[in-house]
Image (tube, helix red, strand yellow):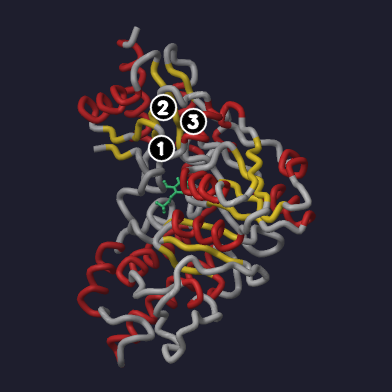
Amino acid sequence: MIYLDNAATAYPKAPGVAQAMADCIEHAAGGPGRSFGAFGEGPARIVFETRQALADLFGWPDPTDIVLTSGATYSLNLALQGLLRPGDHVVTTGLEHNAVSRPLTHLRAQGIQITRVACPGGLSPEPGAFREALRSTTRLIAVVHASNVSGALLPLTEISAIAREADVPLLVDASQTAGGVPISLADGGPHLLAFTGHKGLLGPPGTGGLFIDPSLDVQPLCRGGTGSRSFSDEQPTDRPDRFESGTPNVPGIAGLGVGVRFVAQRGVTDIRAHETRLIDRLLSELGAVPNVSIYGPRAAEERVGLVSLNVGDVDPAEVGLRLEREYGIITRCGFHCAPWAHESQGTLDRGAVRLSVSPLTTEEEIEQAARAIREIAAHAG
Ligand SMILES: Cc1ncc(COP(=O)(O)O)c(C=O)c1O
């Protein structure tokens, strides 16, 4: 099997992820801050070390500003619902995933105004478009770092500078970039960074987190037991406890820690170079093939490790099925939980087939995938 659906979830995971999770169930079953002695200390250490590894990866000095969550969807909801109030205005893009567009659509009904910066062709907007969209009531700029549909990478440094200059917090959905594209939270980076554990960080599903700049007043999305200040019926104000109610997913966090350390050891710059090389190869193999329409930026450097395409008038579901049945290649077809992005890209009527790589994908696998698509395209007339 050739697995090219890493933008949905990475496979395989980093070496050691499954073992760390199993060890945790067997030997570190207590709740951090809740169980006595070694039973509670093991889990507490696992959570501490994973949080520290994430802070190191993103270049942030204080790990307590990193909230561990069930994934990017929870993190984005926490940021959007914890910050925005009726009357606020938010600037976002036409490339957002449903993890941003659905909470925003919900918030619009509560009096939040939204400006969606246009992204024709599924391409990144010019950074200046964010400045032009600002109003006196703008409370947040919320952008995806890279589209999970077109692959377009947005210029984070420029957008961060515009947000800082306007004194408006910037929320970044790094679901498609954490682990695959260098991200620095220090020196004028975003105020909020939502990331998932099961894609570029090569960890298990149901893990992820949210960086929250300590200057921001974000309300928790959920309140309850934190294993701290248990005598009080008020939600603690300390970070990260304020945002982490309920017994944490320690086995998942253990697996995530292994993934993050693997990525850090290999080096995000090295991973980025590897994935850019693979995508460059795929684009050059398929770029001139009659009947194949490739969406998003032309240059591999302007994208993350994914390519969306269609073959003639063939239903993307049929292309995906043929790739799997006839060639053993796993891709993802359809709408990728991102109707805004498909609308921007011009594929809301039919969706697309998406191929996405990981640090463990090889050139040979890309070669085989390109050959399979060329054959399908040739027979499609
Ligand atoms: C751009 C983007 N945002 C958000 C998400 C949601 O991530 P999670 O599965 O961690 O909730 C995804 C995952 O598909 C994504 O690609």
Disc 1 and disc 3: Cα gap in Å?
9 Å
Furthest toward the front, the residue is 110
Residue 11, given in percent of the width and then of the height, sits at: 31, 48
Q: Which residue corresponds to mark 3?
A: 342
Q: Which residue corresponds to mark 1?
A: 336
Q: Residue drawn 60% across and 55% down?
A: 171
Instruction: Say which element carries label 1.
Output: loop
Mark 1 close to ligand 1, CB under 8 Å: yes
Marks 1 and 3, the one that precedes in the sequence: 1
For the C terminus, give its image quadrant.
top left
Q: Quadrant of residue 226?
A: bottom left
Query: Can the viewer see residue 242 in this picture?
Result: yes
Q: Is residue 302 left or right of residue 308?
A: right
Q: Are marks 3 and 2 in contact (CB under 8 Å)?
A: yes
Q: Are marks 1 and 3 in contact (CB under 8 Å)?
A: yes
Which three-letter amino acid code belongs to the residue tagged 3? His
Residue 111, given in percent of the width and then of the height, sits at: 62, 50
Q: Residue drawn 62% across and 50% down?
A: 112
Q: Quadrant of residue 42?
A: bottom left
Residue 355, given in percent of the width and then of the height, sits at: 39, 34
Packing grade of label 1 (10 A; few <14, some 14-19, many >=20) is some
Disc 3 and disc 2: Cα gap in Å?
7 Å
Q: Is residue 307 above or below residue 43?
A: above
Q: Residue drawn 43% across and 25% down?
A: 309
Disc 1 and disc 2: Cα gap in Å?
8 Å
Marks 1 and 2, the one that precedes in the sequence: 1
Which of these two is toward me, 370 or 223? 223
Q: Residue 351's mark? A: 2
